[in-house]
Image: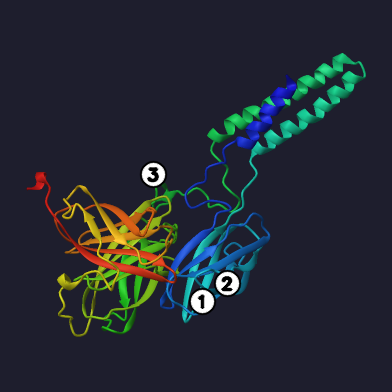
Amino acid sequence: MIRRVLCLAVLLVLVGAAPAAAHNVTAGADLRIAQTIAGTELTVVIKGTSRVPGPLQIGVIAYQPVTGLPVGLEIRSVEDGRTVTGSATAAAEPRFTQLRVERTGPHELKLRAGDEVAVVPFRVLVERASAGDFLIYGGLFLAGVLLVGGLLTGALSRPGPAMALAAGAAAGVTVAALVVVAEPILPPSPPDGAAPTAESTLPDGSAQAGGRPFAQGRVETVPASPAAGAEFTLRLDLVDGSTGRPVDDLVAHHEALAHLVVTSEDGRFFRHLHPLRTGPGRLEVRLRADRAGRYLAYAELEREDSGGQLLTAAFSVTGDPSPAPVEEQQVAGNAGTPALRPAVPVAGRPATIEVPAQGAVRPWLGMTGHLIVRSQDGAFLGHVHEMGTPGGRLRFTFSFPRPGRYLAWSQYAVSDKIVTVPFTVDVAAGEAAR
């Protein structure tokens, strides 16, 4: 009987479910952060580590044609200021650089590429042994010791003490089995280095229920009036609506701290960018607009304990206006024409959009492909993902909210480049709207 219970407990330990991890706080998992820097798209990979002090591996993936772009690396512990430096080379297949970290908790990774610098916040996390593990393995160890003692005592013809030892072994196995059964339904203990539980506060310091408020964004260009064809910086300052302090608690979602979509008002200019964190609450990205006119900017971001949000802004570029209307915009190059089912989508109903791929598709931003949709007047922006359709086509499902004309861009990565397929969609009114 004791042997059966012991075998059952060991089996439960082996098949027990792994503890769930909180959003953006997963010990041992790789962290991937996209960056638009030095005129190209990079993804920085910080591999998870299992021990501290210990090695931390960092690699840089290039998603646009680059020739061995050198990237300077510097890791700084926020808690004690200790820094360690190194370098990496951006490539389609990253070569990892190993740096040493001395403690868990908040760190900053400073990236230098060209004359640009980004500071990426992250946490070094190491899985912490739970009290349940101590009880499970402690109970099994104690049961094993008592069981051996009981067998030896029984062999010496001392049944009383042998029975007592056997009972103790059974109790140890029972405790271990109960913990194995109960542990999956108990809240997991946070890993070493995890952030404290987020709590929103009001200006007077009192707690505020319902999570942190959405960030307020202020967008400006440097210089204030950029010229067509000239490089300029688009700057986004994030401020907490309750306290007025800089918002510096963005979490990585779809492998970026923020996704920034910039389009000209007519839709002929399109960029999907990942701005650099240059200071607390400040995101910046350099770009160049090839035509004058009004531009629209949409920033997708997620604040810790607040969920996702979309910030919108507009700015103007000076110079000679471009006379080409948006109706002339079709699929770029020989990318192939997207197929829509139905051919004329109906507002409020799902439509399928298939886009032929130019070669073998590689994941970008954690997904096979991206579809960004903007209403012609710029009041609406949608962003959905392709989830991995077999074959040489990307398939998206999207419900257009209202009838009218929409501008759309499908994006995916092949080899060492990102392919952007622009097209327009005319959406009919549903029966209820007629």
* Residue holding disc 1: 112
Q: Between marks 1 and 2, how big is the CA–CA gap?
A: 9 Å
Q: Residues within 10 Å of mark 1 (few under 14, many from 20)?
A: some
Lower position in the chain sequence, tag 2 or tag 3: 2
Task: Identify which amino acid the numbered label 3 is placed on.
Answer: Ala
Tell me: residue 19, above or below residue 88: above
Q: Position of residue 7 (x, y in %)?
A: 70, 28
Residue carrying label 2: 74
Disc 3 + disc 1, Cβ < 8 Å = no
Horizontal side, residue 306 vs residue 96: left or right: left
Q: Which mark is residue 168?
A: none
Cα separation between marks 3 and 1:
40 Å
Q: Nearer the viewer, mark 2 or mark 3?
A: 2
- The answer to which quarter of the image holds residue 46 is bottom right
User: Camera-side residue: 83 or 288?
Assistant: 288
How much space separates mark 2 and mark 3, taking CA atoms? 38 Å
**62 lies left or right of 96:** left
Q: Which residue is mark 3?
A: 209
Instruction: Point out the residue furthest to the front here.
Output: 391
Q: Residues within 10 Å of mark 2 (few under 14, many from 20)?
A: some
Q: Are marks 1 and 2 in contact (CB under 8 Å)?
A: yes
Dot 3 falls on a residue whose secondary structure is: loop
**Chain-order first, disc 1 or disc 2:** 2
Q: Amino acid at mark 1?
A: Arg
